[in-house]
C-alpha cells in the first residue's frame, strides 16, 4: 500500500496532550532521543518523532489489514479500558481490556480450551438451558460465564495467535510484551518517558496516561486498519 500522511497534525497532538511525559526524575535514559525538553520537572516528548513512528505504525497496520492479518489491542489500565474496547470493536480487532492472563499467548492451547468453554456456556445461556438446571448448579455456571466474559470477552472470536499486537502501556502490560517477544509477534507500543523503546518493534512516543492522548493515538491506528481492510475489499 502506498505510504500516506494519515492526517497526523502536531497541533492536534498538542491539544490531546500527547507530548506530556512523566516527571523527569522517573525517566528511562533510553528515551533520550524521543524527549524534546524538560519543563517544570516534566519531560516533554518530541512530537516530530511521535508523528514519524505513528505514521510508520499506520503503514504497517494498513498493509497487514489489506493482507487479512489479525490484530490484538491490549490496554487494561482504567484510563484506557473503555477506549480500547470501543476502538477495537469499530476496527473489528480482538482486545484485552480487563486483565492480562499469564500465558494468554504463550499458553494459547489452554486459552483455546477456555474460549470453547466460554462459547458453550453462552450457548446454554442463549438457549435457556442454564435456567433449566438446578438453582445451585445454574448459579455456579453463571458465575463462571461472568468471569470468562470479563477476562476473555474481547478475544471470544480469536481462533489463532494475532499477527500484530498493539499495546497502550508498556509498564502495565509488561507480561504481554514478554509473551510477544517470546513468540516473535510484532508489537506497536505507546512509550512514555519512563519506558524502554527497545522492547517493541515500533515505539510510539506518547503520553500513555491521558485519555485524550490514548484516544487520539488509538483512533489513528484503528483508522489505518479499517482503511487497509476497505482497500482490500475494493481490490477484490
Image (cartoon, grey):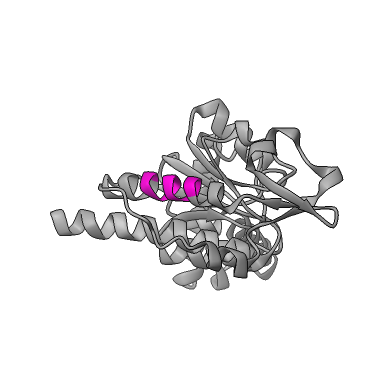
- Give, as a single range, the part of the protein colored magenta: 52-60
Residue 28 appears at what percent x and percent y?
A: 76, 37
Residue 116 in view: no
Residue 164 appears at what percent x and percent y?
A: 45, 42
Name the residue nearer the viewer: 93 or 220: 220
How many discs mark residues in the rendered view?
0
Secondary structure mostly seen in the magenta stretch: helix
Image-quadrant location for residue 176? top right
Residue 48 appears at what percent x and percent y?
A: 54, 50
Residue under the point 54% across and 67% down: 11
Residue 169 appears at what percent x and percent y?
A: 66, 49
Q: Residue 107: say if magenta.
A: no
Location of the C terminus (image quadrant)? bottom left
From the viewer's perspective, is residue 163 above or below residue 6? above
Image-quadrant location for residue 153? bottom right
Residue under the point 61% across and 57% down: 97
From the viewer's perspective, is residue 89 above or below residue 31? below
Does 116 sit left or right of 41 as displayed?
left
Q: Which residue is most to the left? A: 236
Residue under the point 70% across and 40% down: 195
Residue under the point 63% across and 62% down: 81
Residue 22 in view: yes
Amino acid at each position: 500500500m502506498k505510504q500516506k500522511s494519515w492526517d497526523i497534525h502536531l497541533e492536534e497532538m498538542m491539544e490531546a496532550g500527547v507530548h506530556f511525559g512523566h516527571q523527569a526524575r522517573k525517566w528511562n535514559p533510553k528515551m533520550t532521543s524521543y524527549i524534546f525538553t524538560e519543563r517544570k520537572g516534566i519531560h516533554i516528548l518530541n512530537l516530530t518523532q511521535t508523528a514519524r513512528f505513528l505514521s510508520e505504525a499506520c503503514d504497517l497496520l494498513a498493509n497487514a489489514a489489506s493482507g487479512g492479518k489479525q490484530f490484538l489491542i491490549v490496554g487494561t489500565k482504567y484510563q484506557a479500558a473503555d477506549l480500547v474496547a470501543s476502538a477495537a470493536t469499530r476496527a473489528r480487532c480482538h482486545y484485552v481490556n480487563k486483565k492480562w492472563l499469564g500465558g494468554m499467548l504463550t499458553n494459547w492451547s489452554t486459552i483455546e480450551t477456555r474460549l470453547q468453554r466460554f462459547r458453550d456456556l453462552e450457548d446454554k445461556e442463549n438457549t435457556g438451558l442454564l435456567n433449566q438446571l438446578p438453582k445451585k448448579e445454574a448459579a455456579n455456571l453463571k458465575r463462571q460465564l461472568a468471569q470468562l466474559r470479563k477476562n476473555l470477552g474481547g478475544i471470544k472470536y480469536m481462533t489463532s495467535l494475532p499477527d500484530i499486537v498493539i499495546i497502550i502501556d508498556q509498564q502495565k502490560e509488561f507480561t504481554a510484551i514478554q509473551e510477544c517477544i517470546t513468540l516473535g509477534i510484532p508489537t506497536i507500543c505507546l512509550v512514555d518517558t519512563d519506558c524502554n523503546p527497545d522492547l517493541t518493534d515500533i515505539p510510539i512516543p506518547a503520553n500513555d496516561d491521558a485519555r485524550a492522548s490514548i484516544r487520539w493515538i488509538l483512533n489513528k491506528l484503528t483508522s489505518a486498519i479499517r482503511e487497509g481492510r476497505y482497500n482490500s475489499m475494493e481490490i477484490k
